[in-house]
Amino acid sequence: MGASDEGPKTTPDPAAEFAAAADDLVERLAGVPEEDGVVSPFTVDGAELILEELGAGPRLFLLLHGIGMGRRVFADLAAHLAPHGRVWMIDQPGYGEAPEPPRTPTMARTADFVAALLRDRGETDAVVIGHSMGTQVAVELAVRHPQLVGALVLAGPTVDPRARTAPRQLLRLARDLLVESPRVFLLGGREYLRAGPHLRRKMTAMLVHRPEEVYPRVAARTLVLRGAEDYVAPQEWCVGVATLIPDAELAELADHGHETLIRDARPAADRILAFVSE
């Protein structure tokens, strides 16, 4: 009898299969576009990022999620941006499908991880789009690695110094959720569960960061974007952010709250595309 050509058989993992099915169900219920990109891990200094790539062309849009979130909350935004260039959605260490790092990184350290990914792929002049906590990573990336950032979009920037405590942030978020859509609840709920037991440490890393001290050193053209009903990033604070950054402008989107890049992302995508085309 000849040797079998069949390779070793793998045993199905019921837990993994259930998790994948649950993910698919959440995304269908949330109305997330079905197109998935090319997904790959990237490891640097013991921390792992998960990268999902869509689109084609010379322009690169890099999307950085907020606390408790993950790359898939940007699926709708990515679908609108992909016809205009390449889109990178990233799970930061300890979020989404990225495993917990040995230590919870600071905003600056996370920016260094993202910079390492960009350099590894030979990228420069990315359009870096940060949402909520992701804006803090984005400004650190722009200041610490300016050659990698061609333009900057700060959507719902945190943290307003007048609410730099966990209870105040949570209270503002709860108020903001009153105007949010089922998509935000479904996707956000899944991602907060994935962010896991170390969310308190991650919140601390976000709150101890002082973005207002970093803003004046940003050289990239910047769009500060907020939903007109955003209680987490109030108008007065966002005006201050745009004032502190040397080359910045502020835009508001009607009928949107803090999750303006997640809930009905077309208005945000249109404004971002207009900004980078100017």
Image: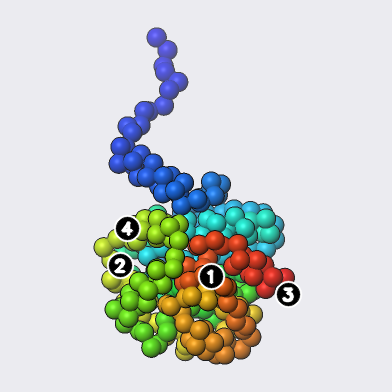
Q: Residues within 10 Å of mark 3 (few under 14, many from 20)?
A: few
Q: Residues within 10 Å of mark 4 (few under 14, many from 20)?
A: some
Q: Position of residue 242 (x, y in %)?
A: 57, 86
Q: Which residue carries the number 4 mark? A: 193
Which secondary structure lies at badge 3?
A: loop
Quarter where residue 47 is shown: bottom left
The residue positioned farthest toward the top in the image shown? 1
Q: Which mark is residue 278?
A: 3
Which secondary structure lies at badge 2?
A: helix
Q: Amino acid at mark 1?
A: Asp
Q: Between residue 63 and residue 121, name the one nearer to us.
A: 63
Residue at 61% across / 66% down in the picture? Answer: 267
Q: Between residue 30 and residue 88, name the one nearer to us.
A: 30
Q: Which mark is residue 199?
A: 2
Q: Which residue carries the number 1 mark? A: 255
State which quarter of the image contains the N terminus.
Answer: top left
Q: In this orientation, does residue 26 appear?
A: yes
Q: Position of residue 131 (x, y in %)?
A: 49, 70
Q: Amino acid at mark 2?
A: Leu
Query: Are the two marked residues, 3 and 4, in contact with CB atoms closer than 8 angstroms?
Result: no
Q: CA distance from mark 2 to mark 4?
A: 9 Å
Q: Earlier in the sequence, mark 4 or mark 1?
A: 4
**171 above or below 114?**
below
Q: CA distance from mark 3 to mark 4?
A: 39 Å
Q: Earlier in the sequence, mark 3 or mark 4?
A: 4
